Amino acid sequence: MLYKKRFEVGFDDSQSKSSRDRKNEFKPKEHAMSDNSRTVSLVRNLREQFRSAVNSTIRKRLVVCFLGLVTLGTGSAIADVYLHNLFPFFNFNGFSGTYSSAGSVDLSGPFFQSLGTNGRTCETCHQPSDAFGLSAVNAQLRYFFTRGKDPLFAQFDGSTCPTGPINNSLVLNNGLIRIPLTVPPNTTDSLPPQFTITAVQDPYGCALTTDAQGQQIVSVYRRPLPTTNLGFLSAMMFDGRESFSLPLNKAQTFGANLNSDLTQQAIDATMGHAQGTQPPTAAQLSQIVSFELALNSAQLFDFAAGSLSKKANGGAEYLSTQPYYPGINDSLGADPGGEGFNPNAFTIYTSFENSRNPKQASIARGEQIFNTQPLTISNVPGLTTGTQQIMGTCTTCHDTFNVGNHSFPLPLDIGTSRSLIYETDPNIIAGLQQLQAPTLPVFELACTQGPLAGTSYYTTDPGKALISGQCSDIGRGKGLILRGLSARAPYFHNGVAANLQQVVNFYNHRFQIGLTQQQMQDLINFLEAL
C-alpha cells in the first residue's frame, strides 16, 4: 500500500504573515473541564488560524490535509505503509518534505511502534509532517482530536509535573517536553558539581526534587529535536549528553560514534519518555538508527516563490548530497582539511538573485544577509570571555555548509534561557523583550569551586552544566540545524520564539545588527525557505 495522495492549494502570502505574527495560545484546563467547552475553545482557535492564513476557497482542502496529518500522528505503526520520497506536508509558508536514501519513508518499522508502556513511539514527538520534529500546532490538533488522550500528553513528561494535576500547557503552546536530569555526580560526571543549585521560581512545584537515592533531579523543558538530517550532527541533544562520551568531532570516528550515540539515545528515549520496562532489542535499535540516518528534511515549496529546487538548490534531495565532516568550514579556523573559513556558508539560493519573482529575490537577499551582515558578538559564553567583543556574521555560529549548525561541538549561551527578572546585560534584555517566553522555573546556580567561584547565575535551563558539573557550561547548549524550520515552530530549545519574526527580532537586538525592516523580512523569507 502506498501513500499517494497529494494536496494542491493556493495561497496569499500577505495573509500568512499576520498568522505567523500572532501568538495562538491553547490553554487546556484540568480534566474536569467539559468536553464541550474544550471543543469550542479549540475550534475557535483553529478557525482563526485558517481565516488569517488562507482564503475561503481552499479551507476545506486544508482541513483534509490536517486530518491526514493527525492520522499520521496517531503513534501506532501501520503495516506496509510508505510515504513517497518528498511527500509534501503543509505548513503556513508552503510544503516541507523528507527524502530517504532508502527510497521511501517506511512507516511500519520500530520507529513507529510502541516499545514502552505509555503508548508512545518515536513518532509521537518526531512527526513526519513536522520535518520529524514537533510543532505546537501539531500538538494542539492532536489534543483536540483525541481530547487530550494522545500518548504525547502522558503525565510523566507531557505535563508540567509527573504527579499532581495534569497541565499540558507547555507542550501545547510551546512544544515543550519535561526533561528530568540528575545533578552531578551522575552518569556523565562522577564528581560533585562546581555549583549549588536552587529553584528561585518554581511555578509548577517540581523544578527541583530529590529522588529515593538522595540525588537532586532538575526539571527542564525543551523542544524535541528533529530525528532527520542527523548525518550533519556535531553534538547530540541540546546539552550534548548523548555524545558526551563518544563525541562527534573527528572524521575517523564520526560514523561509528554517531551510530553508537543514536543507539544509546533510542534506548534512553524508550526507557524514559516511553516509560519502557526493557530496552529495545538489538534488531529494533539497528532498524531505528538506520531509518533515522537515511532521512533528510527541508522546505520544498513556498507559496509565493514556488518550487525551491527548480532553478535553485533548496529542498531535501539536494540536502542529502551535501558533503560533511566534523569541522568543515569551522569559523574558528580549525577545519581539519586545512581550509579557511568561508562566511558564505549558504549558497542554495544564489540563482534567485536576479529573479523576477519578488519572493525568490527576497530569499536570495536574505541568504546574503545571513552570510555577510556584520554583527557584534558579546557575552556569549563558549565563544567570548568577559567583556570581549568580536565581529562576526550569522555564519560565525552557523558554519556548516547549507545546513546551519556549527560543524564542531560548540555549546553556547546566547541568552535565551536567561530570566528578564534577573538579567543585567542590556543587549540580552533587549533581545529577550522580543520573545514570548513561557512560564518556566528559574534556577540559581551559585559557583563554589573553580575559576568562577563566588559567581551566581540565573537561568531557566542550566544546559551542559548538568552534564559536566562545570560552572563554565552554565546555560550553554548546541546550535541547532536550521533546515525545515517552517514545519516546526516555535523556535529555540525552549520554545520562546513563536515565529521566525521573533527569532530575527531577537538576534537584531541581541547582537546590535541594525537591520532595516526590508532586511528583516528578507532574512525571515530565507529562513522560511530552508
Image (spheres, grey):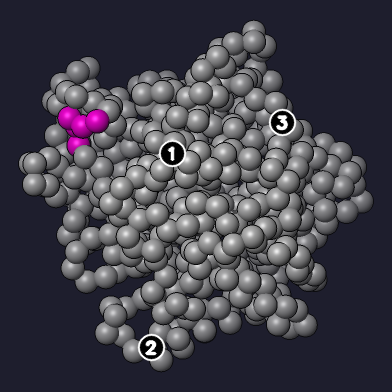
The quarter of the rendered structure image containing the N terminus is: bottom right
| 10 Å crowding of disc 3: few (<14), some (14-19), many (20+) | few
Q: Nearer the viewer, residue 25 or 452?
A: 25
- Helix, strand or loop at disc 3? loop
| Residue 181 position in % (x across, y down) | 25, 42
Q: Secondary structure at mark 1?
A: helix
The span picked out in magenta is 183-187
Q: Which residue is mark 1?
A: 282
Total number of numbered discs in the rendering = 3
* Amino acid type for the residue under numbered disc 3: Gln
> Label 2, on which residue?
35
Main secondary structure along the magenta-highlighted residues:
loop
Q: Residue at x 50, y 38 (%)?
A: 286
Residue at screen point 30% across, 54% down: 275
Relative to 398, say whether 143 is above or below: below
Distance (Cα) linking label 1 and label 2: 43 Å
